[in-house]
Image: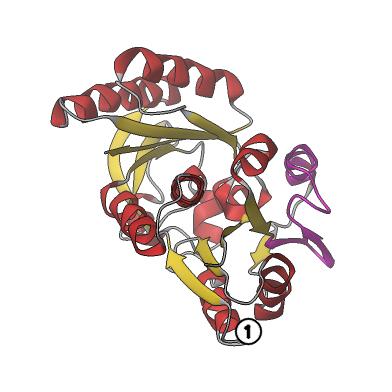
Amino acid sequence: MGKIHVVTDSGSDLSLEIKERFGIHVVPLTVQFGAEIFKDGEEISTSEFYARLKREIEMPSTCQPSPADFVAMYEKIAQPGDTIISVHLSSKMSGTYQSAILASTMLDSSINVKVVDSKSASMGLGLVAVTAAEGVQAGKEIDAILADLQHVIDHLQVYFVVDTLEFLKKNGRIGLASALVGTMLSIKPILTLVDGEVAPFEKIRGKAKALRRVRDLIQEFQKKFPEKQIRAAMSHATTSEEAAQIAEALSLMLPFEGDVLIGEIGPTIGVHTGPGVVALFLFSI
């Protein structure tokens, strides 16, 4: 029996430590400032990205990997008889999933590629990829791993707070939250994802109140699943103190299975959310 490999993209916001621990391979998206193009995590770091974001007048953009980029990764890691689980950004947010689908048809048929639409982003995508890698390490069969991934995708709850909706709006990722554009500046909406698309959850006045409300939502989530273990992840953009406070609250409130994964929002997602973001991802087992 061949090996099973896990591939994701830079929209997963997985730390280097997590990628190395679980053997997860990453295909980067590119970030473009004017005429300059950089591969996320390879040619521009997260700190460099946010520093440049503050300086630039024109908003940057992203571009998905090409099918050839995926083929190069797949052929690098896999041998005939192997299986690749390739988990990617929501197809409603990026063309990355479609690039991976096309790449899977360009390989030798002896390499089996299962492309998965996470219907999420940042550490939501990261949780799906980590779940796949945990299944591989546990020696599970491919069908059992794919069933585990579908459970995460179907049950994942996402809450995130942004400083401004302008980045989501200008980059075309505002989704169902478009009705919130133009509201008072003091309103800090808590957003969520519905079927892989950004959607409003609640409108809160002020960032501090919004973050407190996120902590309340953690407790509400626990009450819904009193007998179940909870998996959780957080991601943040230049708000490490706020993220640490919520992570501490998480560890005190919930009966966790495994670690609370924490990631810094990198350029791929940061282009669309801007700085000052805190995001929470939860699902029950």
- Answer few, some or many: residues within 10 Å of disc 1's Cα (few below 14, many 20 plus, some between 14 and 19): some
Please, what is the three-letter code of the amino acid marked with disc 1? Leu
Rendered image quadrant of residue 111: bottom right
Magenta region:
28-54
Looking at the image, residue 87 lies above or below residue 206 = below
Measured from the top left, where is residue 51 in percent x and y?
Answer: 78, 38
Asked if the magenta segment contains residue 40, the reply would be: yes
Looking at the image, residue 164 lies above or below residue 172 = above
- Does residue 56 appear left or right of residue 201 in this picture? right
Measured from the top left, where is residue 105 in percent x and y?
Answer: 56, 86
Q: Nearer the viewer, residue 93 or 248?
A: 248
Q: How many marks?
A: 1
Residue 275 visible to an observer of this rendering = yes
Asked if the magenta segment contains residue 148, the reply would be: no
Q: Nearer the viewer, residue 221 or 51?
A: 221
Measured from the top left, where is residue 193 in percent x and y?
Answer: 35, 51
Q: Nearer the viewer, residue 137 or 214?
A: 137
**Which residue is farthest top?**
252
Q: Which residue is mark 1?
A: 107
Rendered image quadrant of residue 223: top left
Query: What residue appears at the point 80 percent right and 59 percent down from the top-left corner?
Result: 38
Q: Secondary structure at mark 1?
A: loop
Colour scheme shown: secondary structure
Measured from the top left, where is residue 64 in percent x and y?
Answer: 63, 69
- Does residue 32 appear left or right of residue 120 in this picture? right
Query: What residue appears at the point 42 percent right and 65 percent down from the top-left corner?
Result: 117
The quadrant of the image that shows the C terminus is top left
Query: What residue appears at the point 27 percent right and 28 percent down from the top-left corner?
Result: 217
Residue 276 visible to an observer of this rendering = no
Query: What residue appears at the point 50 percent right and 32 percent down from the top-left corner?
Result: 261
Looking at the image, residue 90 lies above or below residue 168 = below
